[in-house]
């Protein structure tokens, strides 16, 4: 159970690190050009990032099926929480 909790925290940390880096980039010119306030630009960034995330979830379903890495790692290993934790912590530590 503790491994699942740590795995969830690792996945959330990865998502936060990636999102925090990219969230404001798309609408930074709105604030930089004084077209809107910082708060409005931040709201736009949040809305557009959420929309992009939801669309990616919808569209990426087929890619996940194609690129699961089937055959690279035995199925018994991929069901181990420790393996999933290692997979989640790897990219999270690079962010």
Image (tube, rainbow, N blue to C red):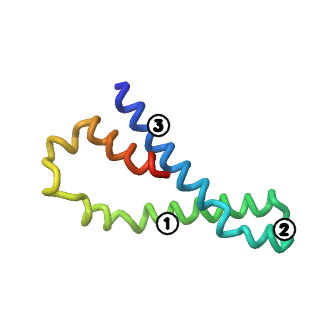
Instruction: From the image, tell me which residue sits under label 3.
Output: 9
Inter-mark Cα distance, 2 to 3: 35 Å
Residue 7 placed where, x, y %?
Answer: 39, 37
Residue 55 placed where, x, y %?
Answer: 49, 66
The relative height of residue 31 versus residue 19 in the rendered view (above or below) is below
Crowdedness near tag 1: few (<14), some (14–19) or many (≥20) residues, C-alpha within 10 Å:
few
Instruction: From the image, tell me which residue sits under label 2.
Output: 36
Whether residues under marks 3 and 1 lie with C-beta atoms below 8 angstroms apart, the answer is: no
Residue 24 placed where, x, y %?
Answer: 67, 62
Tell me the SS state at disc 2: loop
Disc 3 or disc 1, which is closer to the eye? 3
Using residue 92 as the reference point, say whether residue 32 is left or right of it.
Answer: right
Which of the labelled discs sits on residue 13, or is there none?
Answer: none
Using residue 8 as the reference point, say whether residue 24 is left or right of it.
Answer: right
Tell me the SS state at disc 1: helix
Q: Sequence order check: which comes first, mark 3 or mark 1?
A: 3
Instruction: From the image, tell me which residue sits under label 1.
Output: 55
Q: Which one is nearer the viewer's eye here, 42 or 56?
A: 42
In the image as oriented, which residue stretches furthest toward the top? 2
Inter-mark Cα distance, 2 to 1: 26 Å
Q: Quadrant of the N terminus?
A: top left
**Residue 51 picture quarter:** bottom right
Q: Sequence order check: which comes first, mark 2 or mark 1?
A: 2
Crowdedness near tag 2: few (<14), some (14–19) or many (≥20) residues, C-alpha within 10 Å:
some
Crowdedness near tag 3: few (<14), some (14–19) or many (≥20) residues, C-alpha within 10 Å:
some
Q: Residue at x 14, y 41 (%)?
A: 76
């Amino acid at each position: 159970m503790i491994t699942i909790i740590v795995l969830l925290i690792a996945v959330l940390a990865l998502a936060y690190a990636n999102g925090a880096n990219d969230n404001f980039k798309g609408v930074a010119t709105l604030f930089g050009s004084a077209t809107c306030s910082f708060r409005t630009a931040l709201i736009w960034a949040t809305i557009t990032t959420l929309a992009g995330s939801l669309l990616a979830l919808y569209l990426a379903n087929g890619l996940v099926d194609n690129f699961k890495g089937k055959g690279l790692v035995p199925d018994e290993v991929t069901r181990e929480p420790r393996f999933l934790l290692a997979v989640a912590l790897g990219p999270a530590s690079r962010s």
